[in-house]
Image (cartoon, helix red, strand yellow):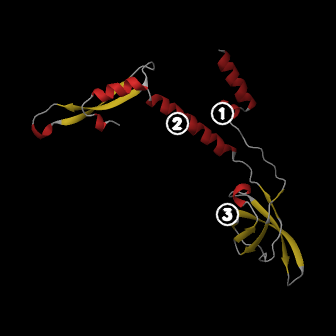
Amino acid sequence: KKKKKKKRERELMGRTDIDDELEIPEWSDAPLPGTGELITSGVVVMGKCTAFDEELEVGDSLLVSVVDKYRNTTTDESRVVNMVLGKSSLNLAQPFTCDVSTPSRFMFVKKPPDVEALRAAHAQAKERAKHAEEQTKEITYKVYKNGTGPWASWKTVTEKVSSSVSRENMLDKRSKMKADRFCK
């Protein structure tokens, strides 16, 4: 009865057991300074002394001051990272208004974490662990089924075993079968 009451209280508060175990990474929308300098050509960004692979991920925003030499203007622009290729190369979803031809300092904003995707991944991992635990409670092997002529065949036998049976005992049982090479 206490469990049901606690579960109801959590649901009223908008929390579930998954939220208790789920680790949501810290996130801030404040721009962070990037290491090194970069130049761009269209959607391609090349870095000098940068660490794009460590700092950036797909979906993060890149902030750069773009200088238009023909109009003598400077604008701060942001573009979404489309692909991180290495520590000194990445691609953007859209090009800046002008190519950055001189090495420039940059900043970046990390994308917010997708809580629903994290919950789904956590639930999936729990389900996989539960399934793996169930798989350890059964043993499968093949036995030669007697028949005459070409109709003789192999029969797959799957036995449920108690949780007290060790993996070594399961292996011993399989090894006693003549057709152990056909085991799963």
**Tag of residue 18:** 1
* Disc 3 residue crowd, few under 14, some 14–19, many 20+, Cα 10 Å: some
Crowd class of label 2 (few under 14; some 14 to 19; many from 20; radius 10 Å): few
Q: Amino acid at mark 1?
A: Ile
- Which of the 4 image quadrants contains residue 179? top left
Q: Residue 39: image x %, image y %?
A: 76, 72
**Residue that protrudes farthest toward the top in the picture:** 1
Q: Which residue is mark 2?
A: 128
Mark sitting earlier along the chain (2/3): 3
Nearer to us in this view, 112 or 175: 175
Relative height, residue 71 to residue 165 (above, below) = below
Residue 161 in sight: yes
Q: x%, y% of residue 104?
A: 82, 70
Going from N to C along the chain, the mark reached first, 1 or 2, is: 1
Secondary structure under badge 1? Answer: helix
For this rendering, which residue is in front, 163 or 72? 163
Q: CA distance from mark 1 to mark 3?
A: 31 Å
Mark 1 in CB contact with mark 2 (< 8 angstroms): no
Vertical placement of residue 153 versus 32, above or below: above
Q: Quadrant of the C terminus?
A: top left
Is residue 123 rendered to the left or right of residue 36? left
Q: Nearer the viewer, residue 24 or 49?
A: 49
Instruction: Identify the element where label 3 is drawn.
Output: strand
The kind of residue tagged 3 is Asn
Give, as a three-letter code, the residue at label 2. Answer: Arg
